[in-house]
Amino acid sequence: MDRPPLSLSHTALSYRNLTHHQLSLSPRSIVAAIEAATRPSGLPSGLPSPSAEDWSLRTPPRDYKKAVEKARRKIRALISVKQCAPLMLRLALYTSYICLYAQRVWITRNYKGLQDKIKLVPLDFGNRPAWYKEKVYHENKVPSLEHNNEVKGESLDLIKYIKSNFEGPSLLPEDPAKREFVDELFAYTDKFGSGLLAAVKGDGDAGTPFEYLETALRKFNDGPFFLGREFSQADVAYAPFVERFQPLLLEVNNYDITVGRPNLKAWIEALDTVKAYKQTKWDPEELVSSSKKRFQVIL
Ligand SMILES: N[C@@H](CCC(=O)N[C@@H](CS)C(=O)NCC(=O)O)C(=O)O
């Protein structure tokens, strides 16, 4: 039976840490998780995702407790009658839709088809709730992923973690030369980001980071992505940066990053054919206005 691995000890079925649990799991999501684990594959879930209100409940109402009790009985019955494997319910990606680092992990989760398994818990970035720092991720940053009773952060690590710990299409080919190249590209991301930030603030030249991408995109030239035909972790790492800085540089510096860079232009166009990425994209105008505030760009 292809059930996910499971631990009952750390689910919403325990009241020991109820505040935290109720923030991350609504009764409805528990039932949805049970259904997902027992539903024959291919059938859609009849239940919607938990609403924003579900996440923000702080006091357990009586019907919440009742629903949890019911879910508990249902899980016990399913485990004994159907002999299904225990079900891991604590699987959440804490995110902020505007955050480019979180977007990397969101794309990875979509690409691997884990939408039903890894639930998004969106946080208001400017107003993160106290429980997030206290109970979930002490670094108080997004993204973070809660899985198997542990919370992990750092977007590039999370891309690798999801790749290694979940099913779904791989974002990393076996070819050692390609793997080495992905490592190289990962290692450059910080320098790339700081170079772009300096450029929008007028302290640097945006050409250098984008020349790096243009050259990198030439290495495997049987397709538009960094590794050629296949979309990979390397594309995931850079796409959210370029999505933000392309319109920002155009508006703030009047600088078109695609001029004289045909590979970069083709890459940006190709990204739009990747559904897992497209689902995470923002309206460019909104991105420019929020990035200007965030990066404190003064025109
Ligand atoms: N290196 C981290 C960076 C994460 C990060 O800086 N996230 C921002 C939001 S885009 C954040 O949570 N900042 C909160 C803070 O620094 O207090 C990663 O790659 O995940």
Image (spheres, helix red, strand yellow):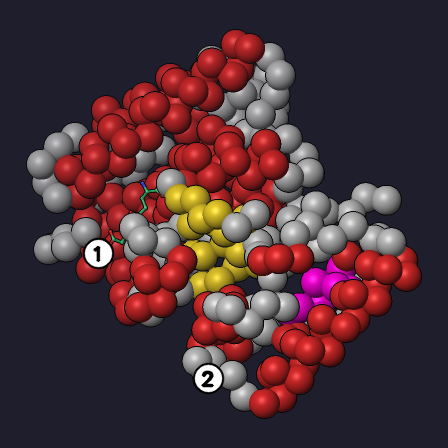
Tell me which corner region of the image, top left, top right, bottom left or bottom right, holds residue 283: bottom left
Circle number at residue 227: none
Give the distance between the C-alpha atoms of the residues marked 1 and 2, in whole angstroms: 34 Å
Image quadrant where one finds the N terminus: top right
Drawn side of residue 121 relative to residue 275, left or right: left
Q: Amino acid at mark 1?
A: Arg
Q: Mark 2 or mark 1, which is nearer the start of the sequence?
A: 2
- Disc 1 target residue: 294
Packing grade of label 2 (10 A; few <14, some 14-19, many >=20) is: few
Q: Position of residue 246 (x, y in %)?
A: 33, 43
Q: Position of residue 2 (x, y in %)?
A: 81, 44
Q: Residue at the location (62% across, 57% down)?
A: 9
Seen from the viewer's position, the closer of residues 222 and 78 is 78
Q: Is residue 32 magenta?
A: yes
Q: Main secondary structure of the magenta part?
A: helix
Is residue 266 visible in the rendered structure shown here?
no
Q: Residue at the location (46% across, 84% down)?
A: 59
Q: Is mark 1 within 8 Å of ligand 1?
A: no
Q: Position of residue 161 (x, y in %)?
A: 52, 36
Seen from the viewer's position, the closer of residues 168 and 217 is 168
Packing grade of label 1 (10 A; few <14, some 14-19, many >=20) is: few
- Disc 2 target residue: 59
Q: Is residue 199 above or below residue 85?
A: above
Seen from the viewer's position, the closer of residues 177 and 161 is 161
Q: Which residues are magenta?
A: 29-36
Q: Is residue 246 magenta?
A: no
Q: Is residue 176 above or below residue 148?
A: above
What is the secondary structure assignment of the residue under circle 1? helix
Front disc: 1 or 2: 2
Q: Is residue 57 above or below residue 261?
A: below
Image quadrant where one finds the C terminus: bottom left
Q: Amino acid at mark 2?
A: Thr
